[in-house]
Image: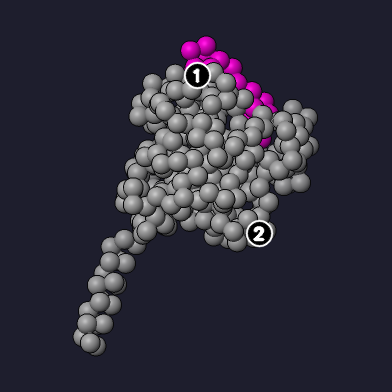
Amino acid sequence: MKRFDTFTLAIAIVFTLIVSGSQVFAAGLITGGPLPEDQHLEDPEPNGDDLREDRSGSPWITLWYGPDGNYEDNGTFQVSGPMDFIEEGSGGKLNQASLSTLEGLLMTQEVDMEWGDDHGGDRGWTVFEIDPADGNNMNRGGPVDNIDTYALIVIDSPSDMQAVMSPAHDDHAQIWINGEKWYNNTRWTGAAQTILHDVEIDLQKGANVLLYRCGESGGSAYFNLHLDDATNDAVTVYPKDSTDQASFFAEIEPLVVSVEPVGKLTTTWADIKRQ
């Protein structure tokens, strides 16, 4: 028995060395993020039906901040997935990664999305509410097929901490936090409140910006997210009570102490409001 234990331990050590520094997947739990750049568009593995878990009754997030409509006629999510519609719509002023930072979020006060008449037209930014039980909660007016939704929240954390997020989606979900990509999955989860994976994430003390993108082709169209109970007890998620862009930024104003953008120039909240 001792020889068996020693051998098992040796195998475990070798396996740990092999996977060290890469993502590890076990029973639907994704650890080791954020995603390396060469894995930004790779699905988790395993990613099968046996991982599905009904999370009805979980504390799903219902209020989001984002463009006031979807990107339309995306050519199917298989085609749109590698494309950056935030960079396209902002003329290069923003991209998906930079939008998931406090600096990028603040820029949405001045930078709207210009997606052209074929793709939804000009989009301002606002707070919108979704119903987590609705299998079509991405449909916010306009076409219901071949669309992409972008949605943001700010997570105010009392300290640096590890948390767990749980996404449900139909179809292609991509999630960035604080400028880094943490999740990519082209497989629908099966139902609006069903997940395939829990994802361990790192939160920094103060404001953490999370960008959730979901691309849809046909049929059901939903995106949902909840955090683990311990994280929910510790953090505050915004939008909280706001209903539009102005009230959203008023709500997060206490979190915006300073932003150090590219070029190391400091932008304060007063600077932003004067622009």
Q: Residue at x 34, y 47 (%)?
A: 49
Does the magenta portion include 113?
yes
Residue 199 percent across, percent down from the top left: 46, 53
Q: Is residue 275 left or right of residue 230?
A: right
Question: Residue 57: where, in percent of width, then height?
Answer: 57, 50
Residue picked out by circle 1 = 143
Label 1 Cα crowd, 10 Å radius (few <14 / some 14-19 / many 20+): few
Q: Which residue is mark 2?
A: 233
> 270 left or right of 83?
right
Q: Is residue 107 visible?
A: no
Q: CA distance from mark 1 to mark 2?
A: 38 Å
Mark 2, secondary structure of its residue: helix
Residue in the picture at 37% in, 40% down: 187
Label 2 crowd bin: few (<14), some (14–19), many (20+), radius 10 Å: few
Dot 1 amino acid type:
Pro
Q: Of the numbered discs in the image, which one, if any, rests on residue 109?
A: none
The magenta segment is 106-125
Is 248 placed left or right of 24 in the picture? Answer: right
What amino acid type should be assigned to the residue bearing mark 2? Asp
Identify the image quadrant of the N terminus: bottom left
What's the residue at 36%, 26% (across, down)? Answer: 79
Magenta span has 272? no
Rendered residue at 59%/17% (across/down): 122
- Vertical placement of residue 5 versus 188, above or below: below
Q: Position of residue 153 (x, y in %)?
A: 61, 41
Q: Is residue 164 visible?
A: yes
- Place of residue 254 in the rendered image (x, y in percent of width and height, measured from the top left): 76, 46
Q: Please state which of residues 100 and 28 is positioned toward the viewer in this rendering.
A: 28
